[in-house]
Amino acid sequence: MSEVFAEEQLLFTPVTPSSDAIATIFAFPNAYNVGITSLGYQVVWATLAGRSDVAVSRLFTDARELLPRDPELVGFSLSWELDYVNILNLLESLEIPIRAGDRTDSHPIIFGGGPVLTANPEPFADFFDVVLLGDGEELLGNFIEAYKQVRNSSRNSQLRYLATVPGLYIPSLYEVSYETGNTGAIASIQPLDSAIPATVEKQTYRGNTLSVSTVVTPKAAWENIYMVEVVRSCPEMCRFCLASYLTLPFRTASLTDGLIPAIERGLKVTNRLGLLGASVTQHPQFDELLDYLNQPQYKDIRLSIASVRTNTVTETLARTLANRGTRSLTIAIESGSERIRQIINKKLEQNDIIQAAINAQKGGLTGLKIYGMVGIPGEETEDITTTISLLKEMKKAAPKLRLTWGCSTFVPKSHTPFQWFGVNKNAEKRLKLYEKELRKIGIEFRPESYNWSVIQALISRGDRRLSKLLELTREYGDSLGSFRRAFKELKEQIPPLEYYVHQDWHTEQVLPWHHLQGALPVSTLTKHFNEVTKVGWVDNRKPKFNFVET
């Protein structure tokens, strides 16, 4: 056993596995300190470890528990796209073929879940036998119970049976055809026969008891942190946002039955508390939660909040965080241009944004990180200039606050209204414009790599033809240059980089995830997209919609 496991404080009691328990490896394809900080990974591992019919061992790239010699199930939680490289490396270290089609009855079933695979598993489809689409609370138990029914059957029989369980996607049981050989758009995605469902629907947990840490350790990336999920999804529904659209509906943890008892349990073993969620401060009882945390007995805790909606930054919130060891706060405004915010459905006024800075300073915080984005559909250079002017106003309104502009490039995400857009090629120039202008006014600029955004878009919009490319880039490295080299080598075998990354798609196209149903149907996504016409946006990059509702 690696020594890192010895320093863990468990907040649950593992069950002793039965003599015929299913030998399982549950892996996070990154280092231990990264993986153990993933709340999703913690919860799934604890759920498996709490079953007597499963004997689970953990595996990371740099640490492992004692692994079974002949596992029946090997699972991966994928939170970051480029971690796929580590999945392939770990499979090879376990002497398991990396491609599902090369596995036999003697090999374990390879399953995967997590946000990356739920959003679009197709680039990785050839590597997984089973993909769990959606929330683990709904899926995990059903998966284990279904597997037990066919545990002693052939591999093919196992997969066909598992395909009948809602939310379990078996990529090998679907055939993809293309319009013009290997390089054309997708023509159709069909199950191999009528016994396989034509559509696999993401499973959504709708309860009000959300996730909390199952382990606390000084070896985590956030040392000794105890994490509590306050909300799940986001009610704002910004048109580009996967964290909102894919995870709908917006759910909040019960304050008296869930949050407070969970926090009390965690603070018995650590003084560091993290409140998680896409829009934590929009919990309907958030003020009551703050009052609870402001009690004298909690004066020594270190409190951090994952995300705060801009117009909920109050002086009280800032003071609470400042008194609990937090120096700065993060808000997301995407753009200082009101026109762009209307296009993306970001319901913020200029005064809301400036007031957030004022309140942060009054409450005693010393820094404010503001997230933005370039390349949003409909954006012009003038919108960048408008954003710079807003940042100047914020600096003037809160002169003692250290402002940081963190900026990424718009990346189209599946199951969102902007999934049909490609990456704007002007985005890189606009990042450089920010860098030049913000330096003049003393605002720190932290851009996300444009090249990484291109890779992210490639995987976000990719189909299963990319498996060959991903195998090649594993050999070449994870730079954009490596991806371009792989595309050159596979010329005439797969579409070019331009097709996946920069090209605008039409709604008539069959998207790679056409057979995978997210939280909302395509008709609703199209309707939401078309609402941008209300702000008078005319742009020749706009896809032509000829969608007929069914």
Image (cartoon, rainbow, N blue to C red):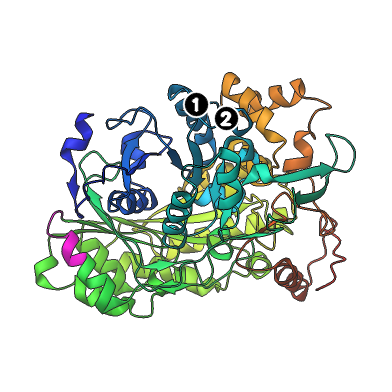
Residue contact at pointers 1 and 2, CB within 8 angstroms: yes
Percent position of residue 418, x then y? 70, 59
Q: Which mark is residue 165?
A: none
Gap in angstroms between the C-alphas marked 1 and 2: 7 Å
Name the N-terminal-most of marks 1 and 2.
1
Q: Is residue 265 above or below residue 269?
A: below
Q: Is residue 27 left or right of residue 448?
A: left
Residue 338 in which image quadrant: bottom right
Q: Pick whichever, 301 or 232, lies toward us.
A: 232
Which of discs 1 and 2 lies nearer the camera? The answer is: 2
Q: Residue 446, can we see it?
A: no
Residue at 67%, 28% in the rendered image: 469
Q: Which mark is residue 103?
A: 2
Percent position of residue 231, x then y? 40, 68
Percent position of residue 247, x then y? 53, 64
Secondary structure beneath label 2: loop
Check the picture and name the quadrant holding the N terminus.
top left
Q: Residue 302, can we see it?
A: yes
Percent position of residue 74, x then y? 44, 38
The answer to if 295 sits in the magenta stretch is no
Residue 464 in which image quadrant: top right
Q: Pick whichever, 280 or 24, lies toward us.
A: 24
Q: Is residue 268 above or below residue 75?
A: below
Number of numbered discs on residues: 2
Residue at 38%, 80% in the rendered image: 284
Range of residues picked out in magenta: 263-270
Return the residue at label 1: 96
Q: Amino acid at mark 1?
A: Ile
